[in-house]
């Protein structure tokens, strides 16, 4: 991009960006903001031991905190996505982070369990506003490499999810009030997202100008033009394909709920490790998720989404089945392997769904991000109740069979990108 006429971090020369060029500067910026957002999000499960001791909570109450955060996110995200498809609102990016900032401050000052639930709800609402529009920005800046763009975007989020527990292990022993320090993370996100929102407005204006220019420019790409031939599948096929993708999301996020919400308790109960040691193990798992996230998108761009979905869901089954029987060392190793394999699923599933309904990017993004949050929250709540009724070890035996749902991938149509077909 030209350096002339820049007025912001992302620059103002966006005419070329309205074509097929991949705008890595924007992709990196939105991925970094995803990192900041999910760092804040991941504080909640990281501080569950602190909240348990402060407010004398049981597993069911801890699960309700997760449910509150994820329910508000899952309930609102599809609505935000649907609205943004009709009325583009790039300002939603900064507004979402602002709501998260309010939730953080409320959490740091919460005098009761009820106030903690309110703060958790605010954090969920912030995510519901942030994710659909930020996913749209990633697609806008992808230059046609949709899988790569969504993976890069997800890498930021998963890296943030890994950072939260690591930071919490060293900062939060100072007490509940220390949560307020993370407000500066949210504030930085607001500043960057305001800049990205301005780029989005300029990008859209450049697209509209190119659309109106006769004759159409060769290679001109707009969001509606992202539709591939396979987007015209029969309505029934699209419906059942989306249903299969939802079932795969259920498998992935119920299993992740067992690790994301209760892994520290599992390690402390079974192996009698310290809270800090358990959170470092959680960081290793979430770090593996962050590292594995990137590979699904580019591989899907080249080899086809369905191949990645096969390996990322069903391929993890042998490792989940062994995990409940492993010692501490192998539990750590297996959790990392599971994170690496399972991580590639979401960005691939999301792009697959976007290719099924390419004219509703915001709605699809909001729906699937909402499902990711909602299923995880429902899973956390139900698994918490199951742990109270039985024990935390039994939860991991039950969840070890969840990846078997990946066999449903056989019912998905083959949506191989054009580049893959040409390369073959």
Image (cartoon, grey):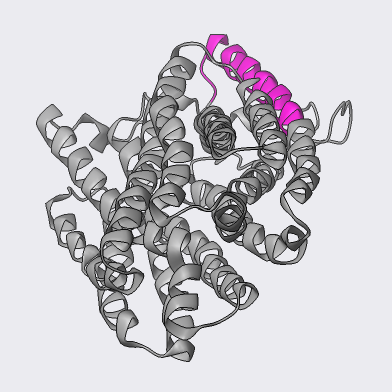
Q: Is residue 197 above or below residue 138?
A: above
Quick check: 189 left or right of 380? right
Left or right: 372 in relation to 117 = left
13 is within the stretch colored magenta: no
Foreground pick, 289 / 67: 67
Tell me: 99 left or right of 381: right
- Left or right: 220 in relation to 37: left
Residue sitting at x 43%, y 73%: 266
Q: Residue at x 62, y 74 (%)?
A: 280
Q: Quadrant of the C terminus?
A: bottom left
Which quarter of the figure is the N terminus placed in? top right
Q: Residue furthest front?
A: 56
- Queried whether the magenta region covers residue 208, the answer comes back as yes
Rendering coords of residue 275 (x, y %)? 60, 72
Q: Nearer the viewer, residue 46 or 373?
A: 46
Chain part drawn in magenta = 193-217
* x 63%, y 54%: residue: 160
**Residue 363 % position (x, y):** 39, 26
Q: Residue 55 at what x, y percent from top left? A: 57, 49
Q: Is residue 333 visible?
A: no
- Within the image, what quadrant is residue 46 found in? bottom right
Residue 240, x across and y down, in percent: 14, 38
Name the residue nearer the viewer: 326 or 139.
326
What secondary structure do most residues of the magenta stretch adopt? helix
Instruction: Decide which of 140, 131 is in the foreground and name it.
Output: 131
């Amino acid at each position: 991009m030209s350096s002339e006429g820049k007025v912001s971090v992302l620059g103002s020369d966006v005419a070329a960006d309205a074509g097929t060029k991949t705008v890595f500067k924007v992709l990196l910026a939105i991925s970094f903001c995803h990192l900041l957002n999910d760092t804040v999000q991941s504080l909640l499960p990281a501080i569950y031991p602190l909240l348990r001791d402060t407010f004398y909570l049981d597993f069911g109450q801890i699960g309700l905190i997760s449910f509150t955060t994820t329910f508000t996110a899952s309930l609102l995200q599809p609505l935000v996505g649907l609205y943004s498809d009709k009325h583009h609102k790039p300002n939603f990016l900064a507004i979402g982070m602002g709501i998260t900032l309010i939730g953080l401050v409320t959490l740091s000052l919460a005098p009761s369990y009820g106030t903690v639930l309110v703060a958790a709800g605010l954090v969920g609402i912030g995510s519901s506003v942030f994710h659909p529009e930020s996913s749209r920005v990633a697609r806008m800046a992808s230059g046609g490499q949709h899988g790569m763009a969504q993976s890069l975007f997800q890498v930021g989020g998963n890296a943030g999810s890994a950072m939260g527990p690591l930071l919490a292990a060293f900062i939060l022993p100072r007490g509940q009030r220390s949560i307020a320090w993370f407000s500066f993370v949210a504030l930085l996100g607001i500043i960057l997202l305001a800049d990205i929102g301005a780029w989005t407005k300029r990008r859209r204006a450049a697209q509209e100008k190119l659309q109106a220019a006769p004759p159409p420019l060769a290679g001109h790409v707009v969001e509606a033009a992202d539709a591939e031939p396979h987007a015209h599948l029969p309505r029934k096929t699209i419906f059942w394909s989306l249903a299969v993708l939802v079932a795969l999301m259920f498998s992935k996020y119920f299993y992740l709920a067992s690790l994301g919400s209760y892994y520290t308790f599992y390690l402390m109960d079974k192996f009698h490790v310290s809270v800090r040691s358990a959170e470092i193990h959680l960081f290793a798992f979430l770090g593996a998720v962050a590292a594995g996230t990137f590979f699904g998108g580019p591989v899907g761009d080249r080899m086809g989404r369905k191949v990645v979905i096969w390996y990322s869901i069903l391929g993890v089954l042998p490792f989940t089945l062994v995990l409940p029987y492993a010692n501490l060392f192998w539990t750590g190793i297996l959790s990392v392997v599971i994170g690496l394999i399972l991580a590639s699923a979401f960005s691939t599933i999301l792009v697959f769904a976007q290719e099924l309904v390419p004219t509703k990017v915001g709605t699809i993004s909001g729906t699937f991000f909402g499902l990711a949050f909602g299923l995880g929250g429902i899973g956390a709540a139900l698994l918490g109740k199951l742990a109270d009724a039985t024990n935390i070890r039994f939860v991991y035996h039950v969840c070890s069979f969840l990846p078997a749902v990946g066999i449903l991938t056989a019912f998905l149509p083959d949506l191989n990108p054009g580049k893959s077909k040409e390369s073959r």
